[in-house]
Structure formats: C-alpha cells, structure tokens
Image: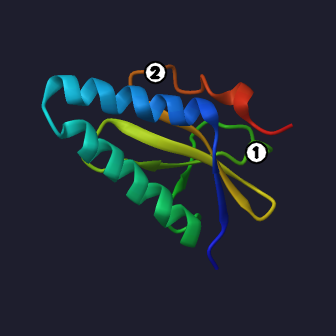
C-alpha cells in the first residue's frame, strides 16, 4: 500500500541546500544527490519498515527511522504518523545526530 507522503519544509530546505552545495563542487552532482534522495523517499511510500532502520539511541516512544542515501553522506529521517510518512530531516552525517528531534509531531 502506497502511503501518503509529507516532506517538512525544513527537510526540503536541507535537500535544496545539499543539492546546491554539490552542484558547486561538480556540475550535475546536485541533481544526482536530489535524485538519490527522491529514490529513497519513493521507497518509503511503499515499504517504510523494510527500507529503513530505527534511529539509534532513541527513546522507545520516539518512532523515528532512517534510510541512508546511497553514494552520499546523508540520511533521510522520517516518522510514520497515522497513514502518512512524514520526512522530518535530510541530515548530513556531520550534523549533531538528533538536531531534528524538535521537529517530531507532538
């Protein structure tokens, strides 16, 4: 069953900033990054549990999961919220691991 998907505004901004940075490094690399993230997000709609792993060291009541972006030092962090997949971060590995916690639904 394909789930509804919502990408939070801050996650979209992280994706955009990452793509811009990669394009500055090499023409077309930002597009490859964008496509890799888009592929990850598409898989989440179909099989969020199979495609992901729990975020380590989270309290049991925090259902955050993650998927690594192939070829890039990024992970897509999401939660299942009802019948919706909510992407809350497109997080670079160098960021503080749980900087996105305040984005979780209350």
Above or below residue 51? Residue 69 is above
Location of residue 88 by image quarter = top right
Residue 63, image x, y percentages? 72, 48
Element at label 1: loop
Residue at the spot of label 2: 95
- The answer, for residue 93, to whether it is visible in the render is no
Q: Which mark is residue 48?
A: none
Between 101 and 8, the one nearer to me in the picture: 8
Q: Residue furthest bottom?
A: 1
Residue 84 falls left or right of residue 52: right
Residue 19 x %, y %: 33, 33
In the rendered structure, the answer to whether residue 50 lies left or right of residue 9 reads: left
Q: Quadrant of the N terminus?
A: bottom right
| SS type, badge 2 | loop
What residue is shown with label 1? 60
Position of the C terminus by quadrant: top right
Which residue ends up furthest to the right in the rendered image? 106
């Amino acid at each position: 069953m394909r789930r509804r998907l919502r990408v939070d505004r801050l996650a979209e901004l992280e994706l955009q900033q990452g793509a811009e940075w990669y394009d500055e490094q090499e023409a077309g690399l930002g597009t490859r990054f964008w496509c890799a993230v888009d592929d990850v997000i598409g898989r989440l709609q179909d099989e969020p549990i199979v495609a992901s792993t729990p975020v380590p060291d989270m309290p049991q009541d925090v259902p955050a999961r993650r998927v690594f972006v192939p070829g890039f030092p990024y992970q897509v962090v999401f939660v299942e919220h009802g019948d919706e997949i909510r992407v809350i971060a497109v997080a670079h590995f160098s960021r503080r691991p749980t900087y996105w916690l305040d984005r979780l639904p209350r």
